[in-house]
Amino acid sequence: MTDLFSPEGFEETGSGPLYLQLSRRIADGIATGRLSAGESLPPERDMAALTGLSRVTVRKAVQALVASGQLIQKRGSGTYVAPKVERLEQALSLLTSFSEDMARRGKASRSVWLSRTVAAPRPDEVMVLGLGAHDRVARLERVRMADEVPLAIERASLPATLLPDPAGVESSLYAVLGARGLRPVRAVQRLSAVNASVEDARLLNVPAGAACLRIERIAYLASGRVAEFTLSLYRGDAYDFAAELKLSPEA
């Protein structure tokens, strides 16, 4: 690693600002494997001493790589090479849970729970779930992890009559509903491109404003009753969604 921070090779003119030269050097070290995922970088003062650059220049170089998602900073710990995220392809024609998707790929999945509550419904939940003014709604909010990498944030709402005890959901919501004979059999999904808010970016370990996929899912029971209203935010650098298209019979 020390050769990445040697003072040789930095040019005052002709190769762009010094912070960009250092940023490119570190990025090249990541791309070529000289800096591996999870490896810590020296403190800013040490990098400044090694390179002969000012701490302001080093800080700008590091922040540029943090903004691009190549480095992550942990408060009180230091700066690390961001883990490499494997891109996953998800078929839009299958109604499966996140846990089932990851198990099919041989990945270990888990949830970091943010909240599991029963409360009075919001106006949008009343409309989508077909609830009355005095009905209750079960809400589940969590970060979905695969092999310890945060991939998505899920915020699900269900009628409390279908899920009276949301705290009983440990991993797969659909497994819990299926055990009660209430697993959804079809769903309508809408996808849109959004930028991660500061808080969502923190939960997903991506830079604020990073490209994400927002998925709204409304799932139905066999009876036609709405069972689930979920808003999910997926990392744009980790997911590709694929759909099969067929020629219409009229054509």
Image (tube, helix red, strand yellow):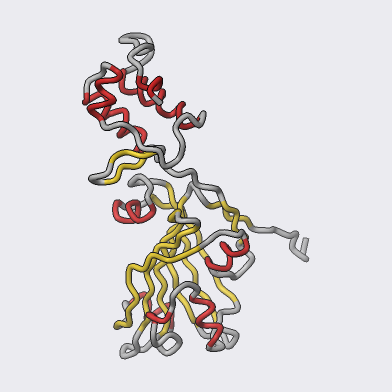
Disc tally is 0
Residue 56 location in percent, x, y? 21, 25
- The quadrant the C terminus occupies is bottom right
- At x 41%, y 84%, the residue is 159
Tell me the quarter of the picture where residue 203 sits.
Answer: bottom left
- Which residue occupies the foreground of this view, 171 or 133? 171
Left or right of residue 19: residue 210: right
Residue 202 location in percent, x, y? 32, 52
Residue 80 location in percent, x, y? 36, 39
- Which residue occupies the foreground of this view, 80 or 137? 80
- At x 36%, y 37%, the residue is 40
- At x 35%, y 51%, the residue is 201
In this view, 91 is above or below 84: below
Left or right of residue 182: residue 123: left
In this view, 93 is above or below 162: above
Residue 242 location in percent, x, y? 62, 55
Tell me the quarter of the picture where residue 244 sits.
Answer: bottom right
In this view, 237 is above or below 117: above
Left or right of residue 45: residue 71: right
- The quadrant the N terminus occupies is top left
- At x 40%, y 40%, the residue is 69
- Which residue occupies the foreground of this view, 94 or 180? 180
